[in-house]
Image (spheres, rainbow, N blue to C red):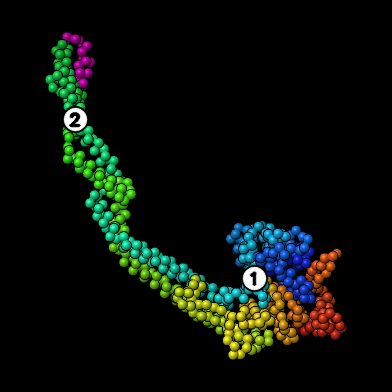
Amino acid sequence: MLVGLSIRDIVLIERLDLDLHKGLGVLTGETGAGKSILLDSLGLCLGARADSGLVRHGADKGQVSAQFFIDADHPARLLLTTHELDEGDDLVLRRVIGKDGRSRAFVNDQPISAGLMRELGELLVEIQGQHDRHGLMDASTHRQLLDALGGNATRLQIVQGSWDAMRKAAGSLAEAEEALANARGDEEYLRHVLTELDEVEPVENEEAGLAEDRALLMNADRLAGAVSDAEKALGGTDGASARLREAERALEKVSEQAGGRLDGALKALERAAIEAAEAVESVEDAGRAFIASPGKLNDIEDRLYKLRELARKHRVTVDQLADLRTSFAERLAAIDGGDAHLAGLRSAATKTRDIYFKAATDLSASRQKSAKKMDKAVALELPPLKLEKATFHTVVESLDESAWTRNGADHVAFEVATNPGQPAGPLTRVASGGELSRFLLSLKVVLASTRIAPTLVFDEVDSGIGGATADAVGERLARLADDTQVLVITHSPQVAARGAHHWRVAKGAKGKQTITEVTELTPEERREELARMLAGATVTDEARAAADSLIMAQTNG
């Protein structure tokens, strides 16, 4: 709940520190005293738009801080954790506005955006008034409120999960259909290209080997000549091999007389002769590889030409042709098997759609049931609020399939008719200012169990009413305050008498400046304020007696 509000240099407020309490708190004062300044100041801490006109004349900046005490499991704490912000024991929202209109927002003295401040504010305080365009006045919230009243959280989660699955399946089907349509548009081209590639049958990393063979064959004549010369030098009767054998035989004839001195030479000649023979054999083998083959060279050059021509045509390298062939073959295979694939995706899309429809239908039935419960409960609240001729209706309208959403297949709206025979219409279009405030109060009472914000603020909820109707308004405000904090700005003594805490807002003077002051009233001061509200400018003993009667009646009640 809101436990403290500190205001510095906002409009007519120079310095104000309010300690706030549980239960029903009322703020009273004459028209123009500055009650709206308090709401504007609180709104700043809840993320409302900043305006340089709010800064008090003569001040460089204005500042408002709102201190809250919230439970450990309140959604505001989860929001702080999500944004990696220090929670602290209490939660303090602070807004600073410069006279140039620029503003800064803080939570527990950590800078945040105005948007995040607004998110936090919506979780902490509900400000309800006939001029407010949020909360119940925002038709987009009606579905959420009805679901909360009907306890539809689990049903809604099932609908949202099935919606996500349905959209995913529909997306997969649409992508596959588009891909298949595009592929079929290219099918003739794909088959033509694949036929060309199949005729050539490209092999990975083939170009380098072909180029090497081509270079070898192009130099075959020169290489063969060199081999022939080598053969002549090594072979024949005058070749190196024959001369080595001749030298070896000459030494063998006299080796016995040499006393072993020729053994080393003989062994060396033997080895040289063997290696010379091996050299002859190797040269002969090489020579056979260099025999000119014009046909083979033509074949290699023809293949290289075809491969390189295809590569240029498809703007790839020769080594990428094999992968290109594989890719085109896979695309054609996908076309050939596309209908079966699409059939599976269509089946999945239909199945997920049926699951969503079943879940949404179950949710719709629960909403219809909750709507009847809500209409009945609101109808009981209207007569005491002098709206006995009015009717309230929760519309749960089925949507066309094209308008289904993640939140179901229904449009939910609160409609009212203020007079018999009058067609029902949206709250904001049908009800007058005073009627609207009372409708909103009745809805707040009925929806009390669905609230997230621990603090409710009502502005002019008693506008244009008095007597028994005002007393009925006060009774409902007090009932709401049994389990939450309620703050109400009121001109009605019947409403004010219900307050557990009472503040008076009044204008005063400080030097030549007019300032707004807020005072928490003692029991005696409260009696005097109620008497003023009853009697006007001149407070009489009769008015004081009437104030006592009001206080006594509320105490006994």
Q: Which mark is residue 443?
A: none
Residue placed under numbered mark 1 in the picture: 453
The structure residue drawn at horizontal position 26% and vertical position 38%, both measured from the top left corner, is 212
Pick the quarter of the image with the C terminus.
bottom right
Instruction: Please tell me in which quadrant of the rendered image residue 389 appears.
Output: bottom right
Residues packed near mark 1 inside 10 Å, few (<14), some (14 to 19) or many (20 plus): many
125 or 265: which is nearer to us? 125
426 or 240: which is nearer to us? 426
Q: Is residue 383 magenta?
A: no
Q: Is residue 97 above or below residue 319?
A: below
Q: Is residue 396 visible?
A: yes
Which stretch did the figure color magenta? 256-272
Pick the quarter of the image with the N terminus.
bottom right
Q: Is residue 271 magenta?
A: yes
Residue placed under numbered mark 2 in the picture: 224
SS for callout 1: loop
